[in-house]
Amino acid sequence: MSPARAGRRAVIAGVATSDYPHLPGMSEHAVHAEAAGRALADAGLEYGDVDGFATAGFFPMYAVGVAEYLGLHPTYFDETHAGGASFEVLVEHAAYAVEAGIAEVVLVTYGSVQLSQMGRRLGTGGGGRGGMAPGPAIYDALWGNTLVGSYALAARRHMHEYKTTPEQLASVAVTMRDHAAHNPQAQYRDAITVDDVLSSRLVADPLHKLDCCVISDGGGACVVTTAERAADLRKPAVHILGGAHATTHHMNLSADADLTVSPAAQSGPLAFERAGITPAEVDVAQLYDSFTITVVLTVEDLGFCAKGEGGAFVEDGGLGLGGRLPTNTDGGGLSACHPGMRGMFLIVEAVRQLRGEAGETQVPGARLAVAHGTGGMLSTGATLVLGKEAP
């Protein structure tokens, strides 16, 4: 991270999720509040201790509105929106603020009732059409690909370049479902096979229904403070060792220079360098899994395997418990929950792993974790490196 002021180091002192995946009786702000209250209780803090607040939503001054709902009057606030990568960015920013002495306790929250509100209002997530693209890209914005279609285009190009197979993509979904079987809150827990994935409805060739994330309600929160403050709190602190974020294009994949390379190729090496570690040292990963191809690209671009070897890596059990890189141990967005933006859930699960609180999917001896969010049409990437011990 940035040079700490007077030895201040940023840590995560509390995490929580709201209930999920279906909350028909709750508003979006109420989901924020449920997650926030639980995260503060997890840390042993109260709303009165909070002087910083961060979140992201799809409307202007969203963080200001949620802060008002929570009864907060922060002197530091942030609503940086980077799609699914937003919450890794917000926690990185919160760490900088804490280490610079700008804030003492930063609460970062997310809440969504996307599943319950389907059909009730026009969607604003995932990138609308009007006014979203400059110059020649406006033709894509009006007549071009859908969100799923964009990821399908990346998948097809990866297949062409590296002979990746539909079976390899499907193995990602199978592994996530295996992990979700141990999560009592997960949206889907029944076991699936590669054949089940390939026989599910084709959504955008080559991606089938089970290659795509679920749609859920839910939220999460975390509390960022100093290591000194956390020493007197309820739970062991998890240290924020490094973070970085990057972007390659806006909302039209046609503007990307290489469909097989995501922004993780930029943010990952920077985050590892700032943390002073290598990918080989990471014990557990929580990676954005909007689609199965998202995971394949991310494991390559973060350096867990070479470019083009992601298909073999996931097919050979690399993401499973006992594999080289246990990933999305709560079941991920493909099976557990995906309420619009999932980045906060990655952070919560990474912290629980490092605390030894992950239950049946606990990775023994986990000391280093990565949470990586992906936003837009493979448009943004943000990587956080978290550690059980201080640097």
Image: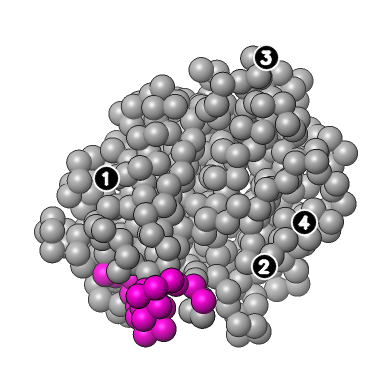
Q: Is residue 330 above or below residue 352?
A: below
| Dot 3 alpha-carbon crowd within 10 angstroms: few under 14, some 14 to 19, many 20 or more | few
Q: Nearer the viewer, residue 248 or 305?
A: 248
Could you say which quadrant of the image residue 347 lies in? top right
The residues colored magenta run: 131-153
Mark 2 or mark 1, which is nearer the start of the sequence? 2
Separation (CA) of disc 2 from disc 3: 37 Å
| Dot 2 alpha-carbon crowd within 10 angstroms: few under 14, some 14 to 19, many 20 or more | few
Separation (CA) of disc 1 from disc 3: 37 Å
Q: Residue at x 65, y 77 (%)?
A: 117
Separation (CA) of disc 2 from disc 4: 11 Å
Q: Secondary structure at mark 4?
A: helix
Q: Indicate whether residue 242 is drawn in magenta.
A: no
Q: Is residue 330 above or below residue 276?
A: below
Q: Nearer the viewer, mark 1 or mark 2?
A: 2
Separation (CA) of disc 1 from disc 2: 34 Å
Mark 3 or mark 4, which is nearer the start of the sequence? 3
Q: Which mark is residue 6?
A: 3
| Dot 1 alpha-carbon crowd within 10 angstroms: few under 14, some 14 to 19, many 20 or more | many
Q: Amino acid type of disc 3? A: Ala
Q: Indicate whether residue 152 is drawn in magenta.
A: yes
Q: Amino acid type of disc 4? A: Val
Mark 3 or mark 2, which is nearer the start of the sequence? 3
Mark 4 or mark 2, which is nearer the start of the sequence? 2
Q: Residue at x 27, y 64 (%)?
A: 154
Q: Which mark is residue 300?
A: 1
Whether residue 132 can be seen here: yes
Q: Secondary structure at mark 3?
A: helix
Mark 3 or mark 1, which is nearer the start of the sequence? 3
* Residue that carries the numbered disc 2 in the rendered image: 59
* Residue that carries the numbered disc 4 in the rendered image: 64
Q: Amino acid type of disc 2? A: Phe
